[in-house]
Amino acid sequence: MFKDAATRDGYGIALVELGHSDSNIVVLDSGVSDSTRTIKFGQEFPERFFNMGISEGDMVCTAAGLARTGKVAFATSFSCFLLGRTMDQILVSVAYSNSNVKLAGTHTGLAVGEDGPSAQMIVDLAYTRAMPNMTVIQPADYEEAVQATKALSKHFGPAYLRLGRPKLKGIYDSSYRFEIGKASIVKQGTDVVVFATGGLVQESLIAADILQNESIFTTIVNISTLKPLDESLIINETKRHNAVIVAEDHNIIGGLNDAVCQTLANHQISVPLKSIAVRDQFAESGSGPELYEKYGLSANHVIKAIKEVHTLKKG
């Protein structure tokens, strides 16, 4: 069954299931547990839940300390607070120390909408991808969020799990098998390949369905692990299509766009390529769909970019 829900909801459900199966799971939150969905874990396992209040630096260091005692620590907050206020603690106590801490940042990208630019975290992938030892994952739907959370609980080492607030249409059912470091093809085509992550997988699927009526057949690849990157799949699909789109709700600098472009450059692969991303600017307050349309992230913009690279490919 395909479940339509936010990725943060999948995270919350997965934590509860993990809590029942593994007594070493501990969860920390910085006063926003209702919104991040960690409250569900806190209600089930109050002795393993730590509400640190508006003290994100303390939360990260406490998580690192718990990890040193053998616990699997999930430190959770809105991404703008989790990363924006704690870069020194994450860099030293988590990444450098190779601590078994899972950083879960919710309410990411322009999709968070009305909370405004100070809450629209669009640089978190750049922060975390640049840190040695850090694994970086962004699920595309509820089911993948559930499975990614469980996979991270068994994966030793620092990790960042990027989660969103809006409800997303279900892409996967329980037959899907998430694997860290592996991308998945969610729609098969022949003309253009779209490498997308998070909510932009949904926008890309909408675009592909519309373009199918115009006899443009698009492959959609969900890049749910941004580090380590599934370079072999990216290379193979690029060579098979010879026209590429990269789509993400993140600044064009430092996220999936840079990861894909670096991979292609390192292997001397040159093809028509267009990027769907925030164009190195802050947005404003508005609904998620309004901001996606204004700042170039909506399905309409994906359609335009696909048509452009398809034309360049034919030319």
Image (cartoon, rainbow, N blue to C red):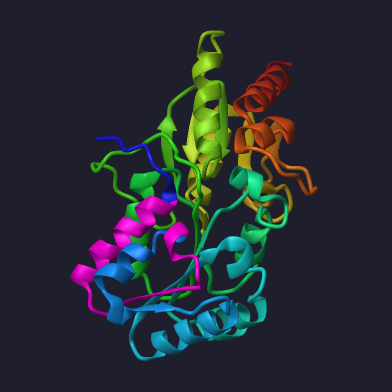
In which quadrant of the rendered view does residue 12 lie? Answer: bottom left
Residues drawn in magenta: 8-35
Question: Does 18 lie within the magenta span?
Answer: yes
Q: Residue 195, percent across and down?
A: 56, 39
Tell whether 308 sits left or right of 191: right
Quadrant of image for the C terminus: top right
Q: Is residue 203 above or below residue 151?
A: above
In which quadrant of the rendered view does residue 298 lie? Answer: top right
Query: Would you say the magenta stretch is mainly helix, strand or loop?
Result: helix
Quadrant of image for the N terminus: top left
Q: Residue 304, percent across and down?
A: 69, 21
Residue lying at 67% horizontally and 19% vertically, measured from the top left: 307
Q: Can residue 110 be seen by looking at this rendering? A: no
Question: Does 103 lie within the magenta span?
Answer: no
Nearest the camera: 86 or 184? 86
Nearest the camera: 167 or 206? 167
Residue lying at 52% horizontally and 8% vertically, measured from the top left: 213
The number of callouts visible is: 0
Residue lying at 52% horizontally and 66% vertically, measured from the top left: 77
Nearest the camera: 46 or 191? 46
Tell whether 54 sits left or right of 100: right
Q: Residue 175, percent across and down?
A: 23, 41
In which quadrant of the rendered view does residue 33 lie? Answer: bottom left
